[in-house]
Amino acid sequence: MSNPGASDQTPARTVAQLAEVLAQGCKPRDAWRIGTEHEKFGFLRPEAVKAGQQAYSAPPYAPNGIEALLKGLQKFEPDDWTSVLDNNNIIGLKGRGEAAGAAISLEPAGQFELSGAPLRTLHETAEELTAHFDAVRPIARELGLGFAPLGFHPTATRAELPWMPKSRYAIMREYMPKVGSMGLDMMQRTCTVQVNLDFGSEQDMVRKMRVSMALQPVATALFANSPFVEGKPNNILSNRAQVWTDTDNARSGMPACVFEDDFSFERYVEWVLDVPMYFIMRDGKMRNVAGCSFRAWMNGERQEGLEDVTPTIGDFEDHITTAFPDVRLKQFLEMRGADAGSPEMMLALSTLWTGLLYDDAALEAAWELVKSRPWEDYVKLRGIVPLMGLDTPWGEGTVRDLAAQMIAIAMDGLQGRDMTDESGQTEWVYLAPLTSLVAGAPTQAERWLERYYGAWMGDVSRIFLEAEV
């Protein structure tokens, strides 16, 4: 579910014009799809470590690292993938044929990401996840690599992690320390899972945006999977979510405009226009304009590095991708509040939001739940759940109670969708890991902590093989 990129050279002149770019995402219900994206940390498997290498350390880009894995996948499935290059370095794969609509990309320290194709059912999502792991695993093993989906790197310092040769990341690497204390941690040491979902109209977008933005902290609590930093617990269940509290607050978080009465495509554009820029593409090259104002540029005001160029629709589409709110609006909605986790939990993430947002009665019930509390309460919740998870106080109970209400609504929504596979299995079976959590089972983070203080005897490196996919 990707945007067309910087191919549209139409000059960008008005807010209404840019809002129309977002409005083009409106689709009839029968065209709504589910796109799942997930990241995972690579590591050197202990049996394959060579002299000078350390078991469980992050693989380099080259040699015999991430670059070789990308080339191996392309060679293994030549009809499905074409290379994505940046200064002649392979930095991703674009799907074609049976993989059309999907992409494989690299996060800054080599976190390996599948951006799944837009799929009709969660059964297809389950098949896609399995097929991806099945394709990556033998090639990775041949290179001596493993992959573990965790929310925050459990052992490495930033200095111990590599940087991928991607122009965008070089710009962000220089800019991030100027605007927050944990931006480089976000880039190098975090992994997420997200689901991308469609909307039918502006009104539908507004309702879905408000519901999912408010409840994103609950997803953070349910999917918490990052309790370790540099080999030790630090009393935070989701260090990934904690990092986002001070990465770059001008472009992240829960924008207040979402809950204002006049929220619309135009209001979101107004917010994005005030998010500082990172780059533009010209003549196939990325130009560093970090800190410049898209609004000022569009209004004809002088911006250093932009004097000789006019803003285009393609520039705006690129700029949208540099805003990082907990729910991001493009020509679809991206749910961004969860740690990466086990394949079952990745699938549960897509299942939860599909159930809440793709059935009218479920969406209405979720909105009634959300609007019973002021917007500010959800913003406060966002700051607490990384530490306390499902035990975070909420009203007269805890976030676990709120999560139970969410899951019950999602269950009804999935039954309303009535999507069964060939064997008659329903979509709501994929919620099973979450129903266990609200019944009192430990989250992924809590389970790792039990292992740390028990069987692992304080050795966090044991997590890599136990979490390996």
Image: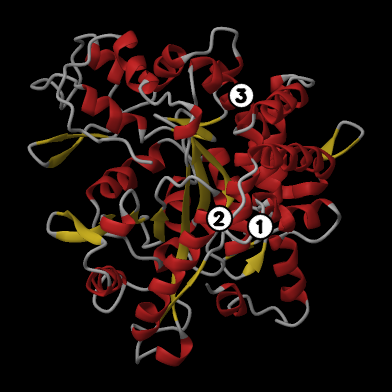
**Residue at point 49% right, 16% down?**
202
User: Amino acid type of disc 1?
Assistant: Gln
- The disc placed on residue 123 is 2
Q: Which residue is mark 3?
A: 210
Q: Which residue is mark 1?
A: 425
User: Amino acid type of disc 3?
Assistant: Arg
Marks 3 and 1 sit apart, C-alpha to C-alpha, by 31 Å
Q: Secondary structure at mark 3?
A: helix
Where is residue 446, by image quadrant? bottom right
Residue 106: where, in percent of width, then height?
Answer: 34, 57
Marks 2 and 3 sit apart, C-alpha to C-alpha, by 27 Å
In this view, 368 is above or below 104: above
**Residue at point 80% right, 41% down?**
399
Residue 87: where, in percent of width, then height?
Answer: 13, 54
Side of 427 where 24 appears, left or right: left
Sequence order check, earlier mark of 1 and 2: 2
Residue 285: where, in percent of width, then height?
Answer: 12, 42
User: Label 2 neighbourhood size at 10 Å, few (<14), some (14-19), many (20+)?
Assistant: some
Q: Secondary structure at mark 1?
A: loop
User: Amino acid type of disc 2?
Assistant: His
